[in-house]
Structure formats: C-alpha cells, structure tokens
Image (tube, rainbow, N blue to C red):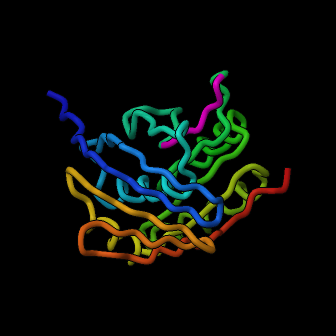
Amino acid sequence: MALKATIFKADLQVSDLDRGYYARHALTIARHPSETDERMMVRLVAFAFDADEMLAFGRGLSSEDEADLALTDHSGAIDLWIDVGQPDERELRKAAGRARRVKLWTYGGRVADIWWEQNRGSLERLRNLEVFRLSGEDGKALATLADRTMKVEVTVQDGAAWVSAGERTLRIEPLRLKAAAEA
C-alpha cells in the first residue's frame, strides 16, 4: 500500500517590499512521504518570493513534468515555473521551453554546490532560467519551523527574507547563482 502525503496548512502573510506586494495566502501543502520538512519549507519560501494569487503548488514529487510551483495566466500558459532541489538538467531544459520564466531554488549545503558545478555549463545556456541557492544552515533552520498548522510571516526586502513562525524569526538570504537574461 502506498503511503499518502501529509497535509500541512499554512497561513502565509507576505510583505514583499521589493515588489510592492502585500497579501495573505491560505495554503494547503501536500508533503510527499519522501519529502523532508526542509524541502517543503524551501517550497514555501520560494512561494513567498514570487507570491501571487495565481501561483499554485504542483502535485509534488510523484508528478514528473510538473513544476513544484507554477504561475499560469488565464489561458493556461505558464508564466513562471519554480522547481526546488537539484533536478535533472534535462527537466530544467524542458521547463525552460514550456514557461516564460523558470526559477530553481537549490539547498542542501555541499550537495547543492556539487550539483551546481556539475550542471552549471549546460544551465548557463538557458536564458530564462534563474538559479538561487539557500545555505545549508538556512535550509535546516527553515525545517525547524515546519508544523502541520503554521502561521508564517515573510517579509522580503533587498533580496533577503525574514521568516517568522511562532516565536522564531529567521533571516534567509538566497545567493543568486544565475540571473535570467533580460527579455
């Protein structure tokens, strides 16, 4: 019998001073049995950085050829495809062909660094791809905030985020490994 996803509820308040975006999102996040709290929370932070009422979580790790997060327009065209982790380079090439913009959030410390060095050359050619890296410490700290019912506040300013849940506040500063080419 297959294990079922664990459902998390997040009341996410986003104050993005960089984009002038301020909104509350009631999110339901399905965490696949093989997904860690760290990965799930990186997905939540990725959501906060590009929060929009049309941004939605994908079906998760069990669904190949689907983004972890996707922003589609009313016609169904994919404006933004967001993946988390260290995906296969071929999957990112496919995403770059399907979406106007693609963002990748890597995490995991040295593992992420090794993955980037192995894939950097081919990923540099994808003009619409932007790659961010969270430090191993940031990823682990985010994992400690995971709770089945969360109230999370994220303030984004100057490319960094302050993530608050309960009594804890973390400063997350993603490193941009690759910028997308100007359109």
User: Which quadrant is home to the N terminus?
Assistant: top left
Q: Is residue 110 visible?
A: no
Task: Write the residue at 61% across / 71% down.
Answer: 159
- Quick one: which residue is furthest to the top in this view? 75
Q: From the image, give the main secondary structure of the stretch colored magenta.
A: strand
In reply to whether residue 177 is colored magenta, the answer given is no
Q: Position of residue 162 (x, y in %)?
A: 45, 73
In reply to whether residue 73 is colored magenta, the answer given is yes
Instruction: Choose top left, top right, bottom left or bottom right for residue 5.
Output: top left
Q: Position of residue 50 (x, y in %)?
A: 57, 52
Q: Is residue 13 visible?
A: yes
- Quick one: which residue is furthest to the right in this view? 183
Q: Position of residue 75 (x, y in %)?
A: 67, 21
| Span shown in magenta | 69-74
Judge left or right: residue 36 versus residue 58: left
Instruction: Choose top left, top right, bottom left or bottom right for residue 80.
Output: top right
112 and 4: which is toward the camera: 4
Q: Compared to 44, does 61 lie above or below?
A: above
145 and 127: which is toward the camera: 145
Task: Write the residue at 70% across / 41% down.
Answer: 96
